[in-house]
């Protein structure tokens, strides 16, 4: 990367505490690399907010991040810098086959990645296909909890703030549009990440799913993928983050995953 600032982190947040915690995390993760944190506190939609942040970004790598994630790998910056030499866009979960407005809908082996979540006193680790390790290639769409992209690729594609003028499916549309444009997408399986909130899949999500299907109908499969395995992947439960980190390795994932 030739930019004097290596990383630009764009965070859309209306919660001062969550923004402060996310900013502190990225300041720690990126301490050895030139970086900037771009705050968007009044986004009209996530697509609009991310586009605004992208226009301000000076880094060669742009990270579009939710304000409620914890990345627990101190080697995050080096891994992402190295991998974005070969990929245009990276995420932590995604799919090699898009059929609907739900990226995980096709199940394993097309759904890929590993993401932990918190529910009460326990940490739940969802594991999909993690082969090849550590980065699954051939990805068509990425979950939006954190999207890492080469700046020029992100600016070429952009977020569709006209169609996706709310807070759902901006990520699926952005990443699938990038795949349609010939960009190389991947999912990183070896970077421990916790998403501290669950998604909302109510009527608003269904409306944006309908918009996604209308926009991309010309390239979506006309028939479902053959015999998908259970869509939810495999879930393992941990009592604390130390146990989670100890398990976050290829041999555990390949043993626990439903993918064979």
Image (cartoon, rainbow, N blue to C red):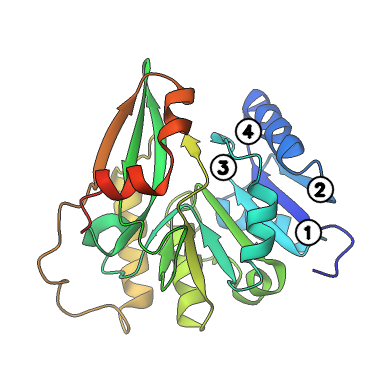
Going from N to C along the chain, the mark reached first, 2 or 3, is 2
Instruction: State the separation of the CA atoms marked 2 and 3.
Output: 16 Å
Residue 110: x and y in percent read: 28, 65
Identify the residue at the far top of this view: 121
In the image, taking residue 122 as reference, residue 256 lies left or right, namely: left
Secondary element at image label 4: loop
* Residue 66 numbered mark, or none: 3
Instruction: State the separation of the CA atoms marked 1 and 3.
Output: 17 Å
- For the question of whether residue 102 can be seen, the reply is no
* Labels 4, 3: front one: 3
- Please give the residue where the numbered disc 2 appears in the rendered image: 36
Secondary element at image label 2: strand
Circles 2 and 1 in contact, beta carbons < 8 Å:
yes
Going from N to C along the chain, the mark reached first, 1 or 3, is 1
- Please give the residue where the numbered disc 4 appears in the rendered image: 14
- Label 2 Cα crowd, 10 Å radius (few <14 / some 14-19 / many 20+): many
* Labels 2, 4: front one: 2
* Residue 57 numbered mark, or none: 1
Instruction: State the separation of the CA atoms marked 2 and 1.
Output: 8 Å
Check the image and report above or below for 252 versus 260: above
Circles 4 and 3 in contact, beta carbons < 8 Å:
no
Instruction: State the separation of the CA atoms marked 2 and 4.
Output: 19 Å
Secondary element at image label 1: loop
In the image, taking residue 45 as reference, residue 81 lies left or right, namely: right
């Amino acid at each position: 990367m030739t930019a004097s600032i290596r990383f630009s982190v764009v965070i859309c947040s209306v919660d001062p505490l969550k923004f402060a915690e996310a900013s502190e995390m990225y300041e720690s993760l990126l301490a050895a690399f030139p970086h900037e944190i771009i705050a968007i506190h009044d986004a009209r939609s996530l697509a609009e907010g991310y586009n605004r942040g992208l226009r301000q970004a000076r880094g060669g790598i742009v990270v579009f991040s939710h304000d409620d994630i914890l990345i627990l790998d101190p080697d995050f910056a080096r891994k992402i810098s190295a991998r974005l030499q070969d990929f245009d866009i990276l995420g932590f979960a995604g799919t090699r086959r898009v059929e609907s407005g739900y990226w995980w809908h096709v199940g394993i082996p097309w759904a890929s990645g590993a993401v932990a979540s918190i529910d009460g006193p326990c940490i739940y680790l969802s594991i999909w296909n993690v082969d090849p390790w550590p980065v699954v290639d051939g990805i068509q769409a990425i979950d939006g909890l954190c999207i890492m992209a080469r700046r020029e690729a992100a600016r070429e594609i952009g977020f569709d703030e006209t169609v996706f003028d709310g807070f759902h499916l901006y990520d699926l549309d952005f990443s699938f549009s990038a795949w349609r444009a010939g960009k190389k997408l991947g999912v990183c399986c070896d970077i421990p990440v916790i998403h501290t909130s669950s998604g909302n899949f109510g009527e608003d999500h269904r409306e944006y799913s309908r918009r996604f299907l209308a926009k991309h109908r010309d390239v979506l499969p006309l028939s479902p993928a053959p015999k998908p395995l259970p869509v939810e992947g495999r879930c393992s439960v941990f009592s604390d983050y130390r146990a989670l980190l100890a398990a976050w390795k290829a041999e555990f994932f390949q043993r626990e995953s439903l993918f064979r």
